[in-house]
Amino acid sequence: MPREEKRQPLTEYREGSFYLECVGGPWKGYTLNEGWNGWATPRFARAEADAIAAAFRDRFGCDFAYDEATGKYLFAPCDHVCKETSATMGSEFTCENNSYDEAEVFGYYDHPTLGRLYLIGTFGWTWLDAECMVCGADFPSVVDAGTPDERFICPPCMGTDPRV
């Protein structure tokens, strides 16, 4: 699907790969392309949501898990997340301005054909489409070439874009 088409609001979910800079990815998810302040708004099946929670636990040591009693994910960010996010985002993000006193609760949507999709950071985190910025192809895995502009260029397009 061409990149421009991926940005148009949809009435049915499109499958894609999504990436979160602070913990990586990509993870397979689904979106209606609503967007949130320019960021992607994915939903994830249980296996992918579990993998995202595990990535946060592994990277930051935070409490992030599926709650059997409610069927939702509970995320209790720790100081490490705040400090690292502050370091990467600079003065725009400070620990004092972002309270983590309470756990975030991520609910779900029961889709008639895709099943239960979890809203992990949907409309609140800085998710990116993990797609080639030249041709728009979804990435099966993210190649971290260093700079954000180089990160999402697939091997066939490498060297064809004047920005890299």
Image (cartoon, rainbow, N blue to C red):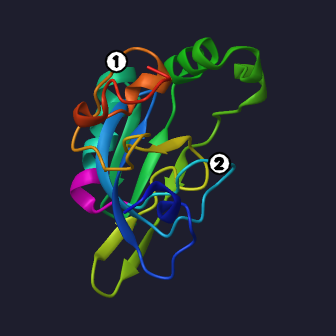
Q: Name the residue under label 1.
A: 145
Quarter of the image where one finds residue 117: bottom left
Q: Would residue 157 be counted in the magenta stretch?
A: no
Residue at the (60%, 11%) spot, across then down: 87
Q: Which quarter of the rendered picture does the N terminus lie within?
A: bottom left
Residue 17 picture location, percent across and down: 33, 50
Which residues are the magenta region? Answer: 44-49
Residue at the (70%, 21%) spot, across then down: 95
Residue at the (28%, 77%) spot, across then down: 114
Q: Residues within 10 Å of mark 1 (few under 14, many from 20)?
A: few
Amino acid type, mark 2: Gly
Q: Distance between the residues labelled 2 and 1?
A: 23 Å
Residue 119 picture location, percent across and down: 46, 60
Q: Mark 2 points at which residue?
A: 38
Residue at the (65%, 48%) spot, across then down: 38
As helix, strand or loop, the secondary structure at mark 1 comes to loop
Towards the viewer: 131 or 13: 131
Taking the image as shown, residue 134 lies to the left or right of residue 100, namely: left
Q: Which of labels 2 and 1 is toward the front?
A: 1
Sequence-wise first label, 2 or 1: 2
Quarter of the image where one finds residue 102: top right
